[in-house]
Amino acid sequence: MGNKHDLRVIRTYKSLTEAFLQLMSKKHFEDITVNELCEMAMIRRTTFYKHFADKYEFFGFFVRRLQSDFDAINPASKDYSDPYSFYISITRDVLNFFKYHEQFVSMVLGSNLLPTLLNILSEQIISDITGKIKIAIKKGVSVSASPEIVASFFTGAIINTIGYWLMQKKKISEEELIKEVEKILYKLTDI
């Protein structure tokens, strides 16, 4: 992808992002073509392909951009010395991310993109949790497995549980979901 500080690139990304949201509000992702995305964004196809291999790569860029705009999903300010509170906090943050981007998430639920969205979020969360665990280990906190495995395990549990909850059309409230996750985490982090 091009220079992030080049005004033309910034304008291109902004135009594509706005056009993408407009198109997603009217049709499923699978039905959106690169041509119509470029047309609505008023950019050339060659410009699009200079930055993205296809619309799926653009979708990944779009989600990462949403994620970077939403600081709370990054557990940078959280301390791993209390794993139970740490994971509950991350669960709340992911739920807040989905709530903050509720319109986009409902559009994604109408397509086949939920697994892609969850995978993109998972990659970042695993990286963030791994970093926090490594810092905690340096401070003397004991961890029962490698930081990467622990991070992958808990991220998978959190993301898949929230994905299931979304697919079930939120049959229970967000607070009920948190209480259920708390029960599970209490047992897992007590080991």
Image (cartoon, rainbow, N blue to C red):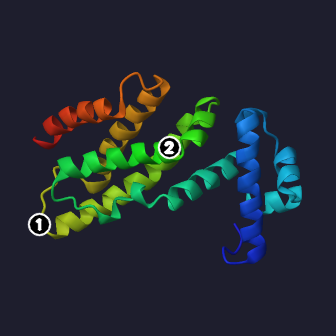
| Residue 90 locus on image (x, y percent) | 32, 49
Q: Is residue 121 above or below residue 177?
A: below
**Residue drawn at 21 percent across, 37 percent down:** 182
Which of the 4 quarters of the picture holds residue 64?
A: bottom right
Quarter of the image for the N terminus: give it. bottom right
**Residue drawn at 15 percent across, 43 percent down:** 189
Is residue 155 left or right of 53 when viewed as pictured? left
Is residue 23 left or right of 92 when viewed as pictured? right
Identify residue type, mark 2.
Asn
Task: From the viewer's side, name the closer residue of 73 and 124.
Answer: 73
Is residue 54 visible from the viewing direction of this image? Answer: no
**Residue drawn at 29 percent across, 29 percent down:** 176
- According to the picture, the residue beneath numbered tag 1 turns out to be 140
| Residue 188 locus on image (x, y percent) | 17, 38
- According to the picture, the residue beneath numbered tag 2 turns out to be 119
Identify residue type, mark 1.
Gly
Residue 166: mark? none
Is residue 29 visible from the viewing direction of this image? Answer: yes
What kind of element bears circle 1?
loop
Q: Residues within 10 Å of mark 1 (few under 14, many from 20)?
A: few
Which of the 4 quarters of the picture holds residue 180?
A: top left
